């Protein structure tokens, strides 16, 4: 059956209009703005590639590459913990263990808490003087391990990453559980009859059948890792302290576009240039990454 | 009959509301809401039919929200604005988004120093509302217990700190996680240790940030960190407020605005104040005093006349009385009746007699461009120095490298020196 063009347009045009207004136009506007210096009011000053030069080779280059590195570390850690750990927990929660229903609800709970609240809760728990974590370590005789977790560069970024994992892992567990529960039971029964052990079942049945979900989640993690802002903002503020050791591209954008506290000037043009660089970096890389994953899954 | 009565009352109320002029006001200081309720009542008592609709925003989000709103031709009638020559307010003035008030408001109750912070090209933009005083706030009961006097020199301060530390009391509680607080501490120490004369020479380009005194200032603070609480780089101002209010620490480097919260947490807290002592006997200490902000008239104001009436009131001592009694802050307007608070009276007196005329934190040119000495150099740099990731010399070099990019007197000096 051939659908008439006007019906196709009838369904496509409204979505296309919204997409153009809320996605295409802002992206185009950001590209345009990145060639200007503009504090948000008054005339824009055309500066050509000056903003890009400043970010990649000038005043902000050190901060920019440090932010890219931290975003990459977010991606690696999120991939390992949010995918790896979530997969293991999902297997446990789909098995016949005691209190399964309770744990299934509990693991998703952090995901429904707003990030501002997450920041507040963890800031309290990680307080070096009266926080729960250090108090617990002192109580069990591990006083030497008590640290100012968010106040030293060696522990600040890993701590922020762990809080992010704690908040998000429930979502990944949920996706993996749905994928595992969708696997026909006959496959497991046949494997057990053939003498397969649990680790065989996981490696040879569950894992290959969950790979497509994992692939999609990996691409999402890649994109989300380079767009992270809220968890750093909630725990360390836009200054991404201590001394930028938790700085990511999101916080760098915020500082350049909106300025810091006090009287310092803001420059939307500079902020837009950061956004354009993130865009140019993330889109092609995620396409390459998606291709690699797709190829591997076909080979498997 | 009953229905008719209710209907009449509702109609009368609607008429009353529609007759009153509503002045909308935006601010980053949510704590000022009660101030404006009392101002509204005072205006109404004086026969003005004005309602003030106050809205507070998060300080970190306020400027961009206000700016975008005014730029879009909307927004409130009155806006809280930062100091001039700060880049943000300058941008608002240059774009004609806030209006000059020189001919509309009587500024006779303000000092020249305060008015400088709202003046550009001879025009006055905004009515200043508060003056902030920074320095060292201490627990008088702890000082009395040990028989300490307020220190007159840096060495005396170190001796006090040493005694307290030996007794297991944290001499200082420093909120090192919030980099701005570290910069404020540096700035209030700098005016007493380096002195206003040194800052003036720096501002004029007669010396630069590679000067040995600038390095010395960093070293002095780096040596002081042994008297801060353990893990201080992970503490924020909330932790500091609790620790100071509940007598867990003896001293804090902070501003007079903290008093309101400390008193709320612990009404019995006995607070004292002293300026950061200089490091040599005979040198004068100074207080870091700055105008916190002003209330500006939006170019898009719907109720311009009513808004100007509110501003006229804000320029009178009566406003200062309300403001200081509600917030325990020092009002920018002179002649106000201050609340019965010894600490407030002392800080006010210090502000009048010992304010440093030259500074390098808020209210100075060094923080008005990019990269800024405040946000881009000292904020991350001091945290790095305290964490032993940067030396005082490297921090001085960073200051020079950043400011020489745009601060004209330093650029000219670098050219002269052939650097």
Image: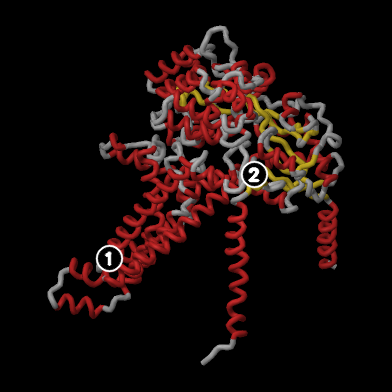
Query: Residue extending furthest left?
Result: A195
Q: Are marks 2 and 1 in contact (CB under 8 Å)?
A: no
Asked if B60 appears above or below A288 in the picture, the reply is: above
Asked if A228 appears above or below B101 in the picture, the reply is: below
Residue found at x 59% / y 42%: A259
**Does residue A214 show up?**
no
Query: Which residue is disc 2 drawn over?
Result: B63
Depth order, front residue of B238/B99: B99
Q: In which image quadrant can residue B127 be found?
A: top right
Depth order, front residue of A14/B55: A14
Q: In which image quadrant can residue B187 be found?
A: top right
Disc 2 or disc 1, which is closer to the eye? 2
Residue found at x 73% / y 38%: B295
Residue found at x 67% / y 46%: A45
Q: 10 Å neighbourhood of mark 2: few (<14), some, or many (≥20)?
A: many
Q: 10 Å neighbourhood of mark 1: few (<14), some, or many (≥20)?
A: some
Query: Residue extending furthest front?
Result: B418
Label 2 and label 1: CA atoms lie apart by 49 Å
Question: SS of the residue at dot 2?
Answer: helix
Query: Which residue is disc 1 drawn over?
Result: A91
Question: SS of the residue at dot 1?
Answer: helix
Q: Chain of mark 1?
A: A
Q: Chain of mark 2?
A: B
Rendering coords of residue B283 (x, y %): 57, 10
Residue B291, labelled with which disc? none
């Amino acid at each position: 059956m051939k659908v008439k063009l006007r019906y196709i347009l009838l369904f496509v045009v409204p979505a296309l209009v919204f997409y153009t207004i809320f996605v295409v136009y802002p992206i185009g506007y950001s590209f345009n703005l990145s060639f200007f210096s503009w504090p948000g009011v008054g005339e824009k000053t055309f500066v050509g590639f000056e903003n890009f030069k400043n970010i990649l080779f000038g005043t902000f280059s050190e901060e920019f590459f440090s932010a890219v590195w931290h975003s990459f570390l977010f991606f690696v850690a999120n991939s390992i913990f949010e995918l790896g750990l979530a997969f293991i927990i999902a297997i446990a929660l789909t098995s016949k263990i005691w209190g399964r229903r309770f744990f299934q609800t509990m693991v998703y709970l952090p995901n429904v808490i707003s990030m501002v609240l997450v920041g507040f809760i963890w800031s309290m728990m990680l307080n070096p003087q009266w926080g729960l974590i250090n108090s617990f370590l002192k109580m069990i005789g591990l006083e030497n391990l008590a640290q100012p977790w968010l106040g030293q560069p060696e522990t600040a970024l890993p701590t922020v990453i762990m809080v992010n994992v704690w908040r998000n892992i429930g979502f990944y567990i949920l996706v993996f559980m749905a994928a595992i529960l969708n696997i026909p039971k006959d496959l497991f029964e046949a494997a057990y009859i053939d003498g397969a052990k649990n680790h065989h079942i996981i490696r040879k049945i569950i894992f290959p059948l969950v790979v497509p979900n994992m692939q999609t989640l990996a691409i999402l993690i890649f994109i989300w890792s380079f767009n992270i802002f809220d968890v750093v903002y909630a725990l360390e503020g836009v200054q991404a302290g201590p001394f930028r050791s938790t700085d990511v591209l999101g916080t760098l954008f915020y500082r350049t576009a909106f300025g810091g506290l006090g009287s310092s000037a803001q420059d939307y043009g500079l902020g837009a240039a950061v956004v354009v660089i993130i865009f140019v970096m993330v889109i092609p890389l995620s396409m390459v990454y998606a291709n690699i994953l797709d190829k591997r899954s076909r080979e498997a | 009959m009953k229905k008719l009565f209710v209907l009449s009352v509702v109609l009368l109320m609607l008429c009353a509301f529609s007759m009153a002029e509503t002045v909308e006001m935006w601010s980053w200081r949510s704590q000022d809401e009660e101030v404006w309720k009392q101002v509204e009542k005072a205006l109404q008592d004086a026969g003005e039919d004005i309602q003030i609709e106050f809205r507070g925003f998060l300080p970190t989000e306020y400027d961009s929200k206000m700016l975008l709103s005014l730029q879009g031709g909307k927004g409130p009638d009155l806006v809280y604005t930062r100091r001039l020559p700060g880049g943000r307010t300058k941008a608002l003035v240059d774009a004609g988004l806030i209006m000059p008030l020189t001919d509309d408001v009587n500024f006779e109750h303000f000092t020249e120093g305060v008015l400088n912070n709202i003046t550009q090209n001879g025009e006055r933009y905004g009515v200043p509302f508060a003056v902030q005083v920074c320095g060292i706030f201490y627990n008088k009961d702890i000082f009395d217990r040990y028989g300490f006097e307020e220190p007159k020199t840096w060495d005396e301060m170190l001796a006090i700190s040493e005694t307290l530390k030996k007794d297991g009391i944290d001499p200082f509680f420093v909120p090192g996680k919030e980099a701005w607080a570290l910069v404020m501490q540096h700035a209030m120490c700098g005016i007493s240790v380096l002195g206003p004369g040194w800052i003036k020479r720096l501002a004029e380009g007669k010396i630069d940030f590679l000067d040995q005194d600038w390095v010395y200032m960093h070293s002095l603070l780096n040596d002081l960190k042994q008297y801060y609480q353990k893990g201080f780089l992970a503490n924020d101002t909330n932790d500091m407020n609790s620790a100071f209010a509940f007598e867990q620490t003896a001293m804090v480097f902070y501003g007079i605005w903290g008093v309101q919260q400390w008193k709320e947490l612990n009404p019995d807290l006995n607070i004292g104040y002293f300026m950061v002592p200089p490091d040599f006997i005979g040198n004068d200490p100074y207080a870091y005093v700055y105008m916190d902000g002003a209330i500006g008239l939006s170019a898009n104001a719907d109720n311009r006349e009513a808004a100007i009436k509110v501003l006229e009131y804000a320029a009178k001592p009566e406003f200062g009385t309300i403001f200081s009694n509600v917030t325990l802050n020092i009002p920018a307007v002179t002649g106000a009746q201050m609340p019965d608070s010894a600490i407030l009276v002392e800080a006010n007196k210090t502000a009048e007699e010992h304010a440093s005329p030259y500074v390098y934190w808020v209210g100075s040119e060094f923080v008005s461009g990019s990269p800024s000495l405040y946000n881009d150099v000292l904020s991350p740099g001091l945290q790095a120095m305290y964490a032993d990731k940067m030396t005082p010399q490297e921090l001085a070099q960073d200051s020079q490298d950043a400011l020489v990019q745009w601060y004209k007197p330093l650029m000219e000096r670098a050219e002269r020196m052939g650097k």
